[in-house]
Each structure stands twice: as C-alpha cells, then as structure tokens.
Amino acid sequence: MAVAVVGCSKCGGQEEVIRQVDAEKTNLVAEKSLTDSLYQQTLRQVDEMMSVLSALEAEEGIVKTMGPERGESANDFRKRMEDIARRMNEKTAMIRKQADEIQNLKNKLASTEKKLALVTQKADSLGRIVSEQQQEIVSLRQQLATSRRAIDSLKAKLAEKDQIINSKVKELNTAYYVVGKRDDLMTKGVIDKQGQVLFFGGRISVKQNFDLKDFTKIDITSLRELQIPAAKDRTSLVSNHDADTFEVIASGESQCVLKIKDEKAFWKNAKYLVVMTE
C-alpha cells in the first residue's frame, strides 16, 4: 500500500512508519507459519510415539502369555524370549528418544509464542499510528488468536500424552524381587522343581504364575545393591540374569551383597528377581 504526502515535512517519518508496519506484518505471517509448522511436527511425533507404545504393549502381552512351544528346547525358548526382550528394549529406546524430541518441540513452541506476543505488541502500536493498515493487522491478530488456541489445545494434548508416557516409563523401570529360602519360596508358589539345575542339587526354576504380594517393588534405575541375609556360597539367583551383569560379594560370615553392574542389561531378560538362600 502506498501513501503520498505532498508538502509535508513529516513525509519521511510517515514513510518509515509504513515500512515498519509492512515489516511487522511480514514478521507476523512468518511467526504464524512457524507456529503452524511446529504444531504439525509435534502432533506427528506424538502419533509416532503412541504407535510405538502400542507395539510395545503388544510385545509385553506376548511375553506375559508365552510358554515353550511343543518340542521346543529350553535353550531355544530362552533365545526366543531374549529376541523379544531385545525388540522391547529397542522400542523403549525409541519411546525415550521421541519423548526428548517432543520436549524439544514444546520448548520451541514456547519460544515462538513469546516472539508472537512481542510482534503483536509492536504491531498494535504501529497499527494505531497508521489507520490504513489497521484492518489487515486485525485480521492477522485473529489468525494469531486461532494459532494460540491451537497451541493451547496442543498443550492439553501434550499434557495428556506426557501422563501416558511418564506412566509407561515408570512401568518400564519397575521390577520386583524376593529373597527367601528354597522351602519358603516353594510354599509361596514362587519356584518349583523344574528347569535349571542348580549347584546344590535339585531342578529349580521360577514358576510362570506367582503372587506378587511376596515381592518387593523397586525402580531399576535406583537399585544398585541388594543385601542378602545368607553367605555367598549359600546364595543363588533362580531368575534369568546374564552372569556378567552382576556379582555376589561376601559381607561377613552370614551376609552377602548382590551388586548390579548394568541395570538395563541385568533386567533385560526378566523383571522379576528371585534370590534363593540355604
């Protein structure tokens, strides 16, 4: 839009104001475009995360109901379980990465919202000076209000998704352990005489179905050591954990300590730790 002022000593100043208005209009359009782009990116990230969560929950469902197939050896069944555990760990890593990406997009949205507020404030001031530009600025402000409502809606959705994600991450980091003598564990239905042959005799393994009331719930990211009220040579792990991920260290004549070297690797095969003492 051009404005001609003849014989006016303020003509140069008026033209400068008009240029500023045009510049702020351009900024408003650019910031709105950026906000819309960030909004769409965030929605795509949330949808991708929910898809991975669904796939992870499906894997967990398979693990909870899985048992050896007819004719399948214990070694083959263990390998099949480890393969599923590997895929679940990969999906867990994807969830954590996508959660970080969503947080980054949320930070960008917050920064863009501040910029939009500053641009709007300046545009309002210039709009009062140049009345010919006011209508177009009002239109842009309406578009900005629409974008803000979209941002508010997105914030609400992200808060809901955050709750789901935090719940899932907490669930992924949750494990259980129980320490007890062989007879006590058998009486409670935690172990039975099938499966792995232990060094002090008898075929002992963890039962597929047991009552968690006898277990202690823990966060795997915070448990590094576990005190065991038995000598090292009278302590063994019945549950399936890779030998290089932990060590049992003597602590006096009738005490020992289970030290976890790598919590992710230690809990990879089982989220239930069963320690048997004699």
Image: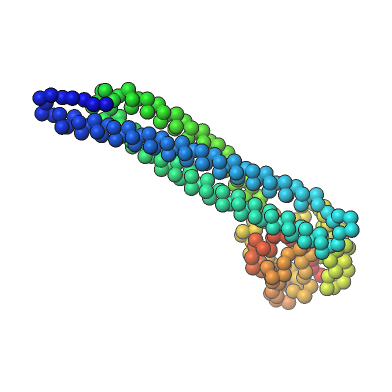
Tell me what residue is drawn at x 77 percent, y 49 percent. Answer: 62
* Left or right of 165 on screen, residue 258: right
Asked which quadrant contains residue 252, the reply is bottom right
Of all residues, the one furthest to the bottom in this rendering is 253
* Left or right of 68 on screen, residue 216: left
Asked which quadrant contains residue 84, the reply is bottom right
Work out whether 84 lies above or below 181: above
Return the x and y of residue 18 as percentages of the image width and height. 24, 30
Which quadrant: the N terminus?
top left
Which quadrant: the C terminus?
bottom right
The answer to whether any part of residue 7 appears in the image is: yes
Asked which quadrant contains residue 16, the reply is top left
* Left or right of 250 on screen, residue 206: right
The answer to whether any part of residue 177 appears in the image is: no
* Left or right of 162 on screen, residue 114: left
Return the x and y of residue 118 as percentages of the image width and height. 33, 37
Between 273 and 45, the residue placed more toward the observer is: 45
Tell me what residue is drawn at x 64 percent, y 68 percent. Answer: 261
Return the x and y of residue 108 as percentages of the image width and height. 44, 44
Colour scheme used in the picture? rainbow
Tell me what residue is drawn at x 51 percent, y 38 percent. Answer: 40
Between 144 and 264, the residue placed more toward the observer is: 144
